[in-house]
Image (spheres, coloured by chain):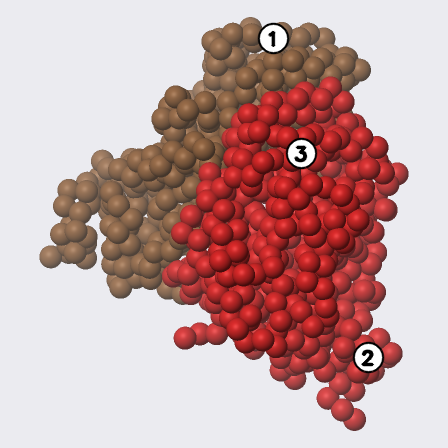
Chain colours: A brown, B red
Amino acid sequence: MTLFTPLEQLLGDRLATSDAIRQQNARNEAHFPLAMPDAVAFPETTEEVAAIVRFCAETGTPITPFGTGTSLEGQHLAIKGGISLDFSRMKKVLEINAEDLNVVVQPGVTRTELNEELRATGLFFPIDPGADASLGGMAATRASGTTAVRYGTLRENVLALEAVMSDGSIIRTGTKARKSSAGYDLTHLLVGSEGTLGIITELTLKLHGLPEGIASATCRFPSVEEAVNCVILTIQSGLPMARIELVDEMMVRGFNIHAGSDLPEQPHLFVEFHGSPSGVAEQAQSFREIAEDFGMESWAEANTTEARNALWKMRHGAHFASAALRPGAQYGTLATDVCVPISQLAEAVLQAQADARAAGLVSTIVGHVGDGNFHCAARFDPNDPAEVEAVHAFAGKLNETALRLGGTVTGEHGIGIGKQKYMKAEHGPALDWMRRIKLAFDPKGILNPGKLLPPED
Amino acid sequence: MTLFTPLEQLLGDRLATSDAIRQQNARNEAHFPLAMPDAVAFPETTEEVAAIVRFCAETGTPITPFGTGTSLEGQHLAIKGGISLDFSRMKKVLEINAEDLNVVVQPGVTRTELNEELRATGLFFPIDPGADASLGGMAATRASGTTAVRYGTLRENVLALEAVMSDGSIIRTGTKARKSSAGYDLTHLLVGSEGTLGIITELTLKLHGLPEGIASATCRFPSVEEAVNCVILTIQSGLPMARIELVDEMMVRGFNIHAGSDLPEQPHLFVEFHGSPSGVAEQAQSFREIAEDFGMESWAEANTTEARNALWKMRHGAHFASAALRPGAQYGTLATDVCVPISQLAEAVLQAQADARAAGLVSTIVGHVGDGNFHCAARFDPNDPAEVEAVHAFAGKLNETALRLGGTVTGEHGIGIGKQKYMKAEHGPALDWMRRIKLAFDPKGILNPGKLLPPED
C-alpha cells in the first residue's frame, strides 16, 4: 500500500511510476533542470481526470498537466513532484461541426493531428507555434505563432471549454455561439492560466476556411532596420498578411547549417498571403511595393505546396537551427519572446541585436513581427556561471526594454517558471488580483504549483 | 453632517442629491421600474473614482457605474440605492496612437464622440450597438452590434484597461502589444463583468482603417426562412460581411411608421461590404449570387454616404420603431438577444416568430444574424398581469430554445437584472466559480450589487 494505491486501482497500468516514464515527462527543450514527477497518470476520460484531481485534493498532491512537453518556460514540469497528468491518451476529435466552423477536441490532440482530421472538410485550424504542441497545452499557455497576425491567438480561437477544477468538479464554459455577454468570461480566464486554475479537458475551437489562394515568398533586406520598418508600414497600411516573419542574419546562418538552405546571410522576411487567387496577387503586389521602398534586394516565391512546406518547415526548425550555431547537448537555449506595439518594433529589435553582440552571445532573432512579437534564442553553458549570468542579464534587459516600450515580456510562451520575476514589473498592483483568483480557485495550491505566480515577497 | 458629507467635501457640487438628477439616472429604456440612487457622483479623474470607492467600502455603500443609461438589462440602475457613479465628466480621448492602431479613452466617451475625434486619422472604432452608448458601458457589458460579424465585439477590441477595484486600489491590465501570454487575462475578466468586479476608468481600444470601399444594400426575401438560410450559407462560405442584418416583416412595418420608409412589409436583409473598391464589388456580386438562390426579390443599393447613413439610422432606430407598433408611454419593451450557432439560426428565428404569434404579442425581429444573434422586441403593458406573464413566458421559451440549440441567452445585452434567472441553466456548475470570483474581488458586495449573479438558492 503506497500513497498512490488508490490511483493504481483506478488507472491500472495507466499510472506509471517507473524511472523511464517519469523521466520522459521531466525533460524540456529549454534550459530548465530535470523535474521528476512522483508518478505519471494517463487518463482517458474527463471523469478519470476528475477522480485523479479529487485524489490530489484529498492528499495534497501536486498535479501538473502534460501535453507534448514542448512548452518553453517549463509549464509542463512537475517541479514540486506529485502527478504528471499526461494527456497522450486523450486524443479524440469529438465533433467536427463544419457548418458552424468549429470543432470539439480532447486536449491531447496536436495541431497537426487536428488538421489531418480536417483534411476532407475544406477547413483548418490555423494557429501554428513552431512545435507540434497539444491543443490543450496551446490553450493553457495562450499560444500563437506565425499565423496569429491574421487568425489571432488561442485567445481568439477558443469558443468554449470543459475543465476540471481543484475540487474535482467539472465545469463547461462558453457556448458554440460566436459571442455571448452572459457573465464572467471563464473561458478566457482559463486560457493562458497554465493549468494553475483548472485543467482543460475539452476544447471547442474555431475553424477557418482553407484559402483558395496562397502565396509565400522570402525576401532579403540590406539591414534588420529596413526589414523591420517594412513590417511596420505593412501592418499600418492594413495589408491582411497571413504570415510575416523576421529572420535575422544569425538565424539565416542557423537555417543554412540545420536545414541545408543556402540563403545569403542577410536579414530576411518570410511572408505569406491568403485569399482569393486575385486577392493574393493584389496583396503580394502591394507588399512588394512597400518592401522595395525599404531596399528589398530579392524576392523568391515558394510557388508549389512542396516549396511552401519546405519554407515553413525550415522556419519551424528555428529552435534547433539556433542550437546548431553552437552544437552540443551540454548547452541550453534561452528563448525570449517579448511583444511590443508595432511602432516600437525597430527599437526593440535593434536594441536586442546590439545587446547580444555586446554580451558576446551566440543569439538569433526570428519572430512574428506582424504582431510586434520576436524571439531571441541565446545558447549558453548551464555549467558556466559567467555564461548563465550573461544570458540572464541579456534576457532581463530585453524584457525591461519591452515593458518600457509599452509591451509584454511574453507574447506567446507564457510565464511558467522562467518569467515569474517579471510579473510584478509588468502587472504592478494587478498582480495582487491574480493572486486573489488563484486563492479562490485553488485554495490548497495543488494545481501546477510553482508556476505563473511569483512567490509572495 | 450626513452620510455623504465626506463625498460632498471631495466633489463639491459634483455630488448631487436632488430628486431631478437622481431621477435622470433612475430611468431605463427597457421595462424595469425606476431605481433611485441616494446620490449621483460625477468624478473627473481616476483618483476621484478611487476615493469614492474607498468611501463606499468604508461605509458599505453600494456603487453603480453609469454611462449613458442605455443598457437594456438594467445594468446602470442603482437598485440597492447608494451611489450612481456617473461618467459624463470623464470624456477625454487621452491618446490617439494612429501608428499602433489604438486609442486610449476615458469611459464616458461615446462611440460617436470617439469616431468624431478620429475623423482626421483615416481610422475608426467600428463597434456599433444601436444606442450611442459610452465606451465604458460597452466594455462593461461586452457590447457588440451590427459590425461584430466583421470586427468582433468589445471582447476582441479592448487591448488594455485601468480599473478601480472594490478596495479603491487602481490596477492596469494588458498592454499596448497586440497579444500577451503574461498571466491571467484580467482585461477580459473585467470586460463583460458589468461593474461587479471593478470599475473601468480607462480603456485602450483597437482601431481599424476606414475601408477604401463601402457598399450597402437592402434586399427583400419571400420568407424569413429563405432570408435566414441565405445568411447561413453566406457565413459558411466565408464571405467577409461587414454587416448582415435580418429585419422581419413586423420590423419593416415599425420602420415604415417610425422612420417614414416605404419598404414592402416582407423580410429583408440589410447588408454592407468593406474593402478595396474592387474587393467590395466582388463581395457584393458573390452575395447576390447566394441571395438569388434563396429567392431574393429585390436589391436596392445605398450608394451615397447620405443614403447609407439613412439606412443605418433607420436600423439603429429599431428599439423605438418597435415601440411605434404599439405606441404609448405606459407600455414597456422586452428585448431579447439570444445568440445561437449559425447552423441553428433558422430554427431559432422561426420558433421565435411562431411563439410570438401564438402568444398574440406585438413583437419584431431584427438582428445581427451573421453572428447568430437576433432580437425580439415585444411590447407589453407592465400593469396588465396577463401581458406581463405572456411576454416573460415568450422570452423564457426563446432563451430555453437558444440553450437547447447550443447558444447563449445573451449575445450582447448582458445579464443585468433581467437574465439572472437563466444563469444556472446556461452555466451549470461554472456559476459557482463565477461566485468565487465575485467573493474574491468584492467581498463586501458594494460593486453594482444585485446584478449579473442570481441570488444564491
Q: Residue at x 77, y 27 (%)?
A: B213
Q: Residue at x 33, y 59 (%)?
A: A169
Chain at tag 1: A
Q: Could you tell me which secondary element the residue under label 2 belongs to?
A: helix
Residue count near mark 1 (Cα–Cα under 10 Å), binned few <14, some 14–19, many ≥20: some
Looking at the image, which residue is at 24% across and 50% down?
Answer: A48
Mark 2 or mark 3, which has the lower sequence index? 2
Q: Nearer the viewer, residue B190 or A428?
A: B190
- Quarter of the image where one finds residue A55: bottom left
- Residue identifier under label 2: B20
Determine the image quadrant of residue B198: bottom right
Tell if the residue under mark 3 belongs to the same chain as the one under mark 1.
Answer: no
Q: CA distance from mark 2 to mark 1?
A: 69 Å
Q: Amino acid at mark 3?
A: Cys
Mark 2 vs mark 3: give the one in front.
Answer: 3
Q: Residues within 10 Å of mark 2 (few under 14, many from 20)?
A: few
Where disc 1 sits, the SS reads: strand
Residue B385: x %, y % from top left: 54, 76
Give residue A209's position: percent from left, percent from top.
51, 26
Which residue has dot 3 on it?
A: B219
Q: Nearer the viewer, residue B262 or B385?
A: B262
The answer to whether residue A355 of the structure is visible from this angle is no
Q: Nearer the observer, disc 3 or disc 1? A: 3
Mark 3 surroundings within 10 Å by alpha-carbon count, few (fewer than 14), some (14 through 19), many (20 or more): many
| CA gap, disc 3 and disc 1 | 42 Å
- The residues bearing labels 2 and 3 have C-alpha atoms spaced at a distance of 46 Å
Q: Is residue B376 above or below residue B117?
A: below
Q: Which mark is residue A301?
A: 1
The kind of residue tagged 1 is Glu
Q: Quadrant of the C terminus of chain A?
A: bottom right
